[in-house]
Image (cartoon, helix red, strand yellow):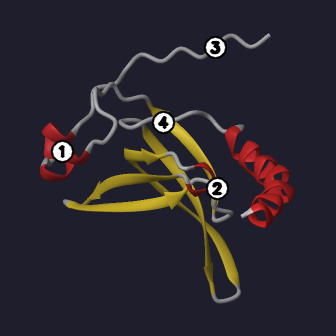
Amino acid sequence: MDLLKAVDDIYASEREDFIIARDDDEQFYPGDTVKVNVRVIEGERERIQPFEGVILRRRANGAGSSFTVRRTSFSVATERTFPLFSPRVQSIEVIRRGSVRRAKLYYLRERSGKSARVKERPYRRSKQA
């Protein structure tokens, strides 16, 4: 067991640098509407594909953190789960802040139309000096 701990300590600084690199992004929470720019590789070509929707859940697990985004297009709902620290996720942009009282918004799965909307919460950016 001491050998495993020693190896873990050696690579701990590399993991922290990797996690800090993604923490520079804007904070987002369940209920927020976000645009996730994902790198898609088709054959030899690479392009950026935006996926815009509401955050249903956020799973905090260190380097294994992930979040689920749900969007509805032409009356068909699609959910995608993205690893937070994946190199495929180029950027996460918050479009609207949502006002919700739950950490997991699974109840939105049964709703459609106006009842599936999330109330917007006023958002003020902190003053940067």
Q: Which residue is mark 3?
A: 126
Residue 31 position, x and y percent, is 35, 36
- Say which quarter of the image contains residue 119: top left
Return the disc, 4 or 3, that comes first in the chain's sequence: 4
Return the disc, 1 or 2, that comes first in the chain's sequence: 2
**Amino acid marked by disc 3:** Ser
**Amino acid marked by disc 2:** Phe
Q: Is residue 61 above or below residue 86?
A: above
Q: Which residue is mark 2?
A: 85
Name the mark nearer the viewer: 2 or 4: 2
The circle drawn on residue 95 is 4
Return the disc, 1 or 4, that comes first in the chain's sequence: 4
Q: Nearer the viewer, residue 5 or 121?
A: 5
Residue at image x 43%, y 60%?
A: 81
- Are dots 2 and 4 in contact, CB under 8 Å? no
Q: Nearer the viewer, residue 13 or 1?
A: 1
Q: Residues within 10 Å of mark 1 (few under 14, many from 20)?
A: few
Please identify the quadrant where the N terminus is shown. Answer: bottom right
Residue at image x 83%, y 59%?
A: 6
Residue 80 position, x and y percent, is 40, 62
The CA distance from mark 4 to mark 3 is 17 Å
- Are dots 3 and 1 in contact, CB under 8 Å? no
Q: Is residue 69 left or right of residue 111?
A: right
The CA distance from mark 2 to mark 4 is 20 Å
The CA distance from mark 1 to mark 2 is 27 Å
Residue at image x 69%, y 81%?
A: 45
**Amino acid marked by disc 4:** Ile
